[in-house]
Amino acid sequence: DAKTTQPNSMESNEEEPVHLPCNHSTISGTDYIHWYRQLPSQGPEYVIHGLTSNVNNRMASLAIAEDRKSSTLILHRATLRDAAVYYCILDAYSGAGSYQLTFGKGTKLSVIP
Amino acid sequence: DVKVTQSSRYLVKRTGEKVFLECVQDMDHENMFWYRQDPGLGLRLIYFSYDVKMKEKGDIPEGYSVSREKKERFSLILESASTNQTSMYLCASRSGGAGFADTQYFGPGTRLTVL
């Protein structure tokens, strides 16, 4: 079962910031919070991940709540190329020598010109 | 750049056929994964492998098997394809092991249709 809850869809105007929320109230201390996105007709691609502190990279920022039960992906200026399904995922140790992603249904982001 | 390649983008097979989906990664990653993606159900993990000749069942392994004879190659096998296995199949790889979480890289997907 997916361990995260996201809105099914969101809309944003082009060149405006977008805040994509995610709830993960059952997160454990060793779970990383990952965000991936999937553009139409492509495989998912990595966006960002974090454990406890806020993270920034060239694509986005990740804000993690102090209790780690929620997080927000921030796209600073949405472009039409950012229209995709965004997945918030808890990366949990599988016990078989690997961390394992469990995907939920994600948030479909539409960007309006 | 990491590359994960899949043998076919589109595949059409008949019910009962044995189907092989091949995945190759070029970054010496230990871990490889097979997912299927269906509308309304998202991505679901079928099998994964954390080392050569090692495999672990994911959430929906029934009707599938896998093979990992070389580190760079992970094959998904449908022993007897059925229409309910019509889906998009995605392969992925990542490095790391216990205590280390890293980026997972996906292939472009294989859209399989079973008639």
Image (cartoon, rainbow, N blue to C red):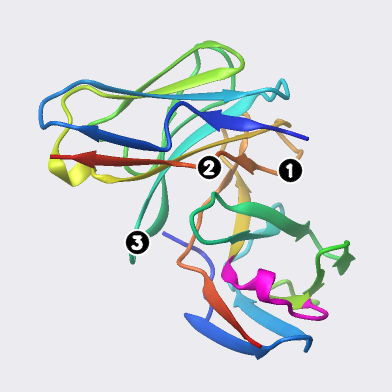
Tag on residue B108?
Answer: 2
* Chain of the residue on which disc 2 is drawn: B
Question: Quarter holding the N terminus of chain A?
Answer: bottom left
Report crowding for label 1: few under 14, some 14 to 19, many 20 or more residues within 10 A (C-alpha): many
Amino acid type of the residue that numbered disc 1 sits on in the rendered structure: Ala
Residue that sits furthest to the top in the current view? B69
Q: Nearer the viewer, mark 3 or mark 2?
A: 2
Image coords of residue A43 (percent x, y) = 54, 49
Residue at 54% x, 18% y is B73
Structural distance between the alpha carbons of marks 2 and 1: 22 Å
Magenta residues? A75-86
**What residue does disc 1 label?**
B101
Closer to the camera, A16 or B44? A16
Quarter occupied by residue B32: top right
- Which of the marked residues, 3 or 2, is nearer the chain's N terminus? 3
Of residue B53 and residue A94, the one placed in the foreground of this image is B53
Between discs 2 and 1, the one toward the N terminus: 1
Where residue A89 sits: x, y (%)? 60, 60
- Please give the residue where the numbered disc 3 appears in the rendered image: B41
Badge 3: how crowded within 10 Å, few (<14), some, or many (20+)? few
Q: Chain of mark 3?
A: B
* Amino acid tagged 2: Pro
Q: Mark 3 and mark 2: span between their CA atoms?
A: 19 Å
**Residue at 48 percent of width and 55 percent of height:** A41
Q: Does the magenta segment cover residue B36? A: no
